[in-house]
Amino acid sequence: MQRIVILTGAGLSAESGLGTFRDKDGLWTKYDLEDVATPEGFARNPALVHEFYNARRANCLEAMPNPAHLALARLQHAWPDRVTLVTQNVDDLLERAGAASVIHMHGELTRALCGACAHRWAAPAVMAPKDPCPACAAPETRPDIVWFGEFPYHMARIDAALAQADLFVAIGTSGNVYPAAGFVQEASLAGARTLELNLEPSATASMFDAARFGPASKVVPDWVSEVLREGVP
Ligand code: APR
């Protein structure tokens, strides 16, 4: 049975209107990631960090899944126990496209986390410093997002899937941030073939067996239709 592990990045949601990070007008050209995507930045100025994620949560609510999200959901529905969807994205567009199981290794905008008791709950549209945790009432609530310097979620599950993959596909990611950027090598070493679907070659492009370039809303549905028609190449 051919198993596929798919890793997605901000490029998957770019055509849904959600910003990427490192493209010319990306989020990291407007904000200093030290201020809004590190535990130190949150400790220094929680109001700024909540403002940053409140704005991204509002954008996400207004955004719609694009044909690439819909195609990946279709693939996972067609082969439910063979397709592992891992995303670095914190939006819920794959779920809203109908994907049944998405592994969010960098957390989710729709979730809140208590810094005191680690309770998680559905994030309100707007979060503010000192919001009390619904479980322990501590005023330590934060977005349930994995910041730089913190450990990504679900790594054991992701490593297990990579160890058994026949095909690893990276979609819409620049290959700049580890451990996600190292998945192609991990999959290769486990014997998987590797494919990059991106707007342009990523930083890890040379590690892939094959690549197709173009906007995700075109390249991903074409690839999914081909795989469903002809099987995993
Ligand atoms: N279709 C396909 N790919 C696209 C599109 C598109 N329409 N638009 C942009 N891309 C590609 C870019 O070429 C780039 O390779 O998406 C990638 C976006 O790269 P980044 O902005 O670096 O986003 P990502 O790789 O997801 O970042 C990884 O870094 O800041 C942290 O935690 C954050 O999860 C994020 C991680």
Image (cartoon, helix red, strand yellow):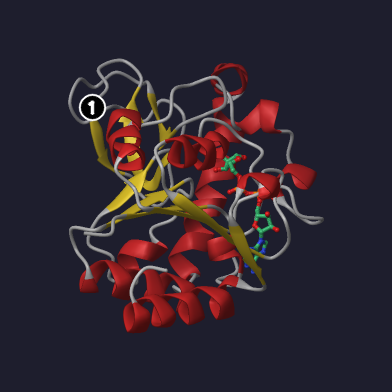
Q: Nearer the viewer, residue 68 or 57?
A: 68
The residue shown at (57%, 80%) is 218
Residue 4 vertical position relative to residue 99 in the rendered view, above or below:
above
Q: Position of residue 105 (x, y in %)?
A: 40, 39
Quadrant in the picture for the N terminus: bottom left
Q: Position of residue 85 (x, y in %)?
A: 35, 54
Q: Position of residue 169 (x, y in %)?
A: 48, 56
Q: Position of residue 11 (x, y in %)?
A: 60, 60
Q: Nearer the viewer, residue 79 or 110?
A: 79
The residue shown at (22%, 68%) is 79
Quadrant in the picture for the C terminus: bottom left
Q: Nearer the viewer, residue 112 or 86?
A: 86
The residue where tag 1 is placed is 119
The residue shown at (33%, 74%) is 231
Q: Is residue 112 visible?
A: yes
- Name the secondary structure under disc 1: loop
Q: Is residue 66 visible?
A: no
The residue shown at (66%, 38%) is 176
Q: How many marks?
A: 1
Residue 114 vertical position relative to residue 91 in the rendered view, above or below:
above
Residue 75 vertical position relative to residue 22 in the rendered view, above or below:
below
Residue 102 vertical position relative to residue 213 in the rendered view, above or below:
above
Snapshot quadrant of residue 139: top left
Snapshot quadrant of residue 45: top right
| Mark 1 crowdedness (10 Å alpha carbons): few <14, some 14-19, many ≥20 | some
Mark 1 Cβ and ligand 1 under 8 Å apart: no
Inspect the image, locate mark 1, and give the three-letter code of the amino acid beneath it.
His
Q: Residue furthest front?
A: 191
